[in-house]
Amino acid sequence: MGRAEKVVLAYSGGVDTSVCIPYLKEEWGVKEVITLAADLGQGEELGPIQKKAEDSGASISLVADAKADFIKDYAFPAIQANALYENRYPLSTALARPLIAKLLVEAAEKYGADAVAHGCTGKGNDQVRFDVSIAALNPNLKVLAPAREWGMSREQTIAYGEQFGIPAPVKKSSPYSIDRNLLGRSIEAGPLEDPWTEPLEEIYAMTKAIADTPNEPDYIEIGFERGIPVSLNGQFLAPLDLVGQLNEHVGNHGVGRIDMVENRLVGIKSREIYEAPALLVLIQAHRDLESLTLTADVSHYKRGIEETYSQLVYNGLWYSPLKGALDAFVQQTQERVSGTVRVKLFKGNATIVGRKSETSLYTPDLATYGAEDQFDHKAAEGFIYVWGLPTRVWSEKMRG
Ligand code: ARG
């Protein structure tokens, strides 16, 4: 008896996931492997990948275009939550995992598979995200992770694949490990493993070097409706187009790079470089619009929710009761978060230079220092007396 009969494998077309196909069959006694490649805008053609899977021994190779869902159902809620892990990483890789898990589970159910599989190793966050998301969506499915157990080096993996007709990579493989989708690129390993080493310009693909950016600033206007970005420079756009155009625009000004050492769930610190031009600017603009449209207490309370939300997403708990409850909170807060944010892009900086909203809580008559001032200055005195009373009493008692 093998570990499973029929398996749906998350497939990227790379050597490691290709080797998973014969490995599952030969070593773990799996009878049938179906591969599933999710198109999340990695920017490669998935047609050849399909053939590659079949050549490597897959019985069926599925390709799912999940780009629109990725933006609408995963990126947009994260923007509403201003989700930044450790206050910096906009979760561009992490957000893709629960969606891929959902596609895997749906395929397993459709084709009557008893397990799903992925090619993650045992050191990263992604294995956690896959395993936990799959368990949440269908706890009856087994999860197989061959690369977590096989203990083969890169060379051994390639040699193993060659026995089953999987060609060794033609070009000298890059020292970096790169994950890419519509929202961004995550780059790690190779020379980046030394946190003191400055990244070479060659690792970037979505953002220009400052030296190559325009010498004039660009202004863009991002329109939001209930916390969802809907327009760019007054033009309403489908989610996919909005993010695509914004990536171009923002990346062209060298905006959207992050170089950080982050804390993985599995206890390891890792140095990671990110590019996420559109996502970062959208979060920045969205947060700014909230400053105009949310009451102070909601806004302050939401900061704590955002922090927890980001940790949950990073730590693989997208499909969890707490995440669901936080989603409900966030949704409720977004009712009035509609309006336009004006952003200036110049030499690696995105600066918010204006915001307006029909649901703005900003009140010029109260804020102004001019003659129109409606604020009751005398009322401040009594307020401060009460506000400061505990401190006054404490001070008096301290002095005896
Ligand atoms: N550290 C990021 C995360 O856990 C990205 C992981 C994938 N990165 C990569 N270079 N393969 O979400």
Image: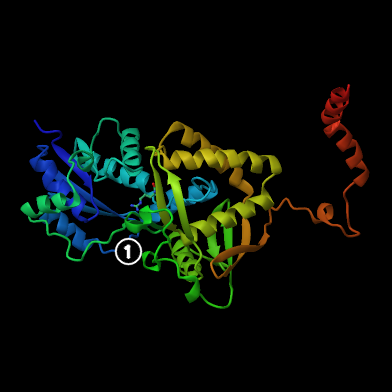
At which x and y percent is residue 38?
29, 53
Residue located at (43% from left, 56% from top): 196
Q: Secondary structure at mark 1?
A: loop
Quadrant for residue 134, please give it.
top left
User: Relative to 369, is 320 on the left or the right?
Assistant: left
At which x and y percent is residue 257?
47, 60
Q: Is residue 32 visible?
A: no
Q: Is residue 124 visible?
A: yes
Residue located at (41% from left, 62% from top): 199
Q: Nearer the viewer, residue 192 or 187?
A: 192
User: Relative to 261, is 229 on the left or the right?
Assistant: right
User: Relative to 371, is 140 on the left or the right?
Assistant: left
At which x and y percent is residue 206?
42, 66
Residue located at (24% from left, 44% from top): 118
| Residue that lies at the very extreme toward the left in this rendered image | 163
Please determine whether, in this image, residue 288 is positioned above or below residue 204.
above
Residue type at mark 1 is Gly
Q: Nearer the viewer, residue 345 or 170?
A: 170
User: Relative to 291, is 260 on the left or the right?
Assistant: left
Q: Is mark 1 within 8 Å of ligand 1?
A: no
What residue is disc 1 on? Answer: 43
**Colouring used for the render:** rainbow
Count of labels shown?
Answer: 1
Quadrant for residue 297, please give it.
top right
